Image (cartoon, rainbow, N blue to C red):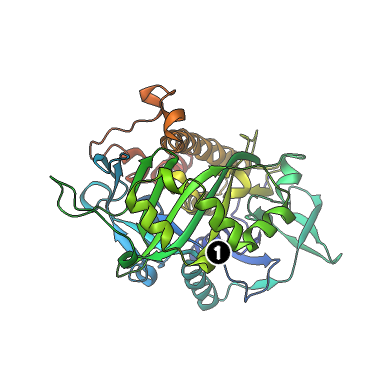
Amino acid sequence: MVQTPPKHVAIIGAGLAGMCLAIELNKRSIQSTIYELRNPTHLTAGALMLSPNAIRVMEDIGLYERVKDKGYLFESIAFKDAEEKTTGVYYLGHEKLYGYQCLRLHRQVLLEELKAIIQEINVPIVYGKKFSSIVSETSEGVTFRFDDDTTATADMVIGADGIYSTVRQYIAPGTTANFSGLLALTCALQKKDVRFPRIEGEDGYHLPVAINGKPGQFVMAPQSSDGEELLAGTQIPYPEQDRAGWARLAADKDKLLSLMRKDYERWPDTVKSALDSVPKETMFDWPFYTMPKLHSWISTAGRVVILGDAAHAVPPAAGQGASQAFEDAYTLAILLEGISEKVGLQEALSFWNSKRQERVDGVVKLTLKINNMRLPQEEREKLAEEDISLSDERGQLAWLYGANIGKDFLDWIEEKTQN
């Protein structure tokens, strides 16, 4: 068993988790190389929500200052009923409670800024390389193969290759993500094009907002720094497609718009005005997949690891997909730096896997509850109140948004070192 931190790590995937991990490792003098299938000009659509737990990691790698003025900062989302009366206000970010507000940002902006940091610290990204398989793994390192039949070696291989992870097949052969049966349909529209009502007893119209109408829930959330561009979207039941089928659907903007407008007459006027104003070219779909709980995120010899969506794909209802990927990368880097004569690699990875799985389990429970709130009215009414309601007290999500996620790992290393 190696009793020193790895000298060189191969990271499969240049997404959020992969690049964040490379930067965190670099801070700790651990070299890495990123291998990415897609070319460097590939563009990613959509926006994401970055909650305070993600922003702490972003601060740690110098990312937050680069992006905070390029997105929309907010603290809470309002839930409204079909008559658009506010039924609850929930805090997703709060400087006093959690240290930060919440940030909604275009995914492409985040990727570009991560890539800029990667270039500044001279971490190589090798494009056009599709990981194929692990050739051999020993206590000393890993040899792995690409689709072009070339091979490479590293002290460790980290699979940050997403929901369709190939690296995962080495750790959990045959494991695939499960389709939830739900498809998110979103677009970007202008705030000025939506008819927001004046509601008696309320000071203005709270955004972001989630309107619980008869067909389900319709969300509108600002995503430009001036708050004028809104994400608008809902989710619908939809049959699973293969990857080619999902690609065809994503390219068919007319069909996506038609699906989004399917229950037009059943929505309140605010939603109707949004649906009337959709720029068709901005339509985007997101099939909700989850990962079955894996027995392990690490290989038997401890030289191959998966993280992010490769290990635990979580639907975006709670806005925690990117946030948990950032947490994975940050905490893994802490433990790899701490490897020593008293902190063995496999023991450290086992501790990391256990603590991270415990936290992801909590996020999954929260996500299921939020997804239940988005069901059509007749389905919501069949559920127990505890399955769909959240307390509206400030600080209810301190366990998630306010946690010092590195402390448990640093404390564990310190305890092991002192014994």
Question: Depth check: 415 or 85 in front?
Answer: 85
**For the point 75% across and 67% down, which residue is it?**
129
Check the image and report above or below for 172 versus 244.
above
**Label 1: how many Cα within 10 Å (few below 14, some 14–19, many 20+):** many
**For the point 37% across and 52% down, which residue is it?**
271
Residue farthest left in this picture: 201
In this rendering, does residue 383 appear at all?
A: yes
Give the image location of residue 311, x and y in percent. Answer: 61, 44
Question: Depth check: 85 or 304 in front?
Answer: 85
Q: In this view, does 216 lie to the left or right of 394?
A: right
Q: How many marks?
A: 1
Quarter of the view holding residue 5 = bottom right
| Residue at image mark 1 | 19
Question: Depth check: 234 or 108 in front?
Answer: 234
**For the point 51% across and 40% down, which residue is it?**
356
Q: What element carries label 1?
A: helix
Residue farthest front in this picture: 265
Give the image location of residue 214, x and y in percent. Answer: 41, 37
In this rendering, does residue 410 appear at all?
A: no
Give the image location of residue 86, x and y in percent. Answer: 24, 41
Check the image and report above or below for 93 versus 351.
below
Give the image location of residue 105, x and y in percent. Answer: 41, 63
Image quarter (top left, top right, bottom left or bottom right) of the N terminus: top right
Q: Is residue 81 left or right of residue 305?
A: left
Check the image and report above or below for 353 versus 406.
above
Amino acid type at mark 1? Met
Question: Depth check: 126 or 273 in front?
Answer: 273
